[in-house]
Amino acid sequence: MASVVLQHVTKRYGNVEAVHDVNLDIRDQEFLVFLGPSGCGKTTTLRMVAGLEELSGGDIFIGDENVSQKPPKDRDIAMVFQNYALYPHMTVYENMAFGLKLRKTPKSEIDRRVKEAAEILGLGQLLSRKPKELSGGQRQRVALGRAIVREPKAFLMDEPLSNLDAKLRTQTRVELKNLHRRLGATIIYVTHDQTEAMTMGTRIVVMRDGVVQQVDTPDGIYNNPANQFVATFVGTPAMNLVKGAVISQGDTASLQIGSQTIELPGRIRQTLSRLNSNALTLGVRPEDIFLGEGRADEPALNATVQVIEPMGHEHIVYLAVEGQPIVARTDNAWQGRVGDVVRMKLNPQRLHAFDPQTEASLL
Ligand code: ATP
């Protein structure tokens, strides 16, 4: 396996800059996930690593070698796409062996690699079946098997789970994670699905409009988002953003939200000098809100309950604070009703703060 390095990688289609100055050091054996909404440039970036798309600027290294000018077949990487087209007239064994045969790999070596991959993927009993005799998940595994037998320097995967149903997607997610560990493989994975990114990635690259927003571990992305876009893209329901005006008085600072004020915790107060004006956007995740009396020293706001969604083990509660919408999660023992005015406590350790002008985190 190998590291993959992107230096100032840029892609332009006419006037559109699909990928802007991406710099990344993807480590050997890393499971790196590109995450972002449709059209953010993640597929284009992956295709440039694969050699399927020319670079408009910058360089890509695989291992120590600059591959920017190399054709895909000489890059020694394997790509798994969302449409994992298998050859329908070939058996599972033949499908997996096909690429190696084309490369004139000795028969005994092909046999060893196919059987090893089949063992890893739990396909040992299915080698003589045709694709139409397999389930969707099994077909997906054969597609992975075809990539594994090549023993590439890195695997590139473009939404490989998107054609599977929800249950199979969850299962395959776990399998992929297991596979990553067993193979000790470098995997670069593209998805718009935050759950896939959070559960599988060793690091996540969040992209928007061709620009990298943040590169961090799943925990880092969730707990310390760099800006409002990352903060609201990861997490369900999304992080709440509440607008207010900062009032500083000596050693304390509070945020005025309509007719209510809450004291800002010290860790936010210390960052206020970075603000461009006195406007501040407070970020709070639905799970960091407590509906009820709670602790007296926690910042609290009065909110009106608008909608309650029972989810079984919890409720998702939609509230309004001074005309601004807020979503909270609460356990299913909570007794509130639509129309109630409730006390909403915010966990001070978990509050985020953003500059409304730049949308960047102050923390
Ligand atoms: P999706 O999840 O929908 O595949 P993505 O994040 O992978 O989205 P890309 O496919 O990388 O996004 O596209 C990035 C941008 O480049 C988009 O605005 C897209 O319209 C544009 N683009 C992609 N390929 C081409 C092309 N061949 N010609 C012109 N524009 C393109």
Image (tube, grey):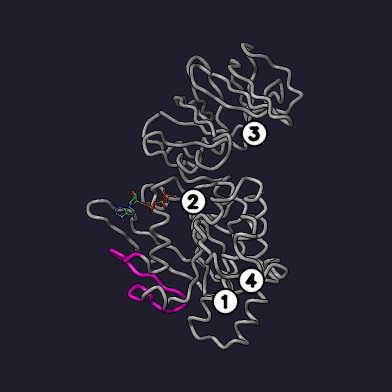
User: Tag 2: Cα neighbours inside 10 Å, few (<14), some, or many (≥20)?
Assistant: many
Q: Earlier in the sequence, mark 3 or mark 4?
A: 4
Q: Nearer the viewer, residue 54 or 134?
A: 134
In the rendered image, residue 280, in percent from the top left (x then y), is placed at 44, 31
Is 84 colored magenta in this rendering? no
Determine if the C-beta at disc 1 is less than 8 A from ligand 1.
no
* Residue underneath mark 3: 287
The residue under label 3 is which amino acid type?
A: Glu
| Residue that numbered label 2 is attached to | 35
Extreme-top residue of the structure: 339
Horizontal side of residue 292 vs 213, given as left or right: right
Q: Earlier in the sequence, mark 2 or mark 4?
A: 2
Q: Which residues are magenta?
A: 53-70
Q: CA distance from mark 3 to mark 4?
A: 36 Å
Q: Residue at x 40, y 36 (%)?
A: 275
Comparing 38 with 325, the one in front is 38
- Amino acid under label 2? Leu
Say which mark, if any, is on residue 310.
Answer: none
Q: Is residue 106 above or below residue 206?
A: below
Residue carrying label 1:
97
- CA–CA distance in space, label 4 to label 1: 19 Å
Residue 62 in the magenta stretch? The answer is yes
Mark 3 and mark 2 in contact? Answer it, CB < 8 Å: no
Residue name at image x 68 percent, y 26 percent: 315
- Front: mark 1 or 3: 1
Looking at the rendered structure, the secondary structure element under dot 2 is strand
Q: Nearer the viewer, mark 3 or mark 2?
A: 2
Q: Callout 3: few (<14), some (14-19), or many (20+) C-alpha neighbours within 10 Å?
A: some
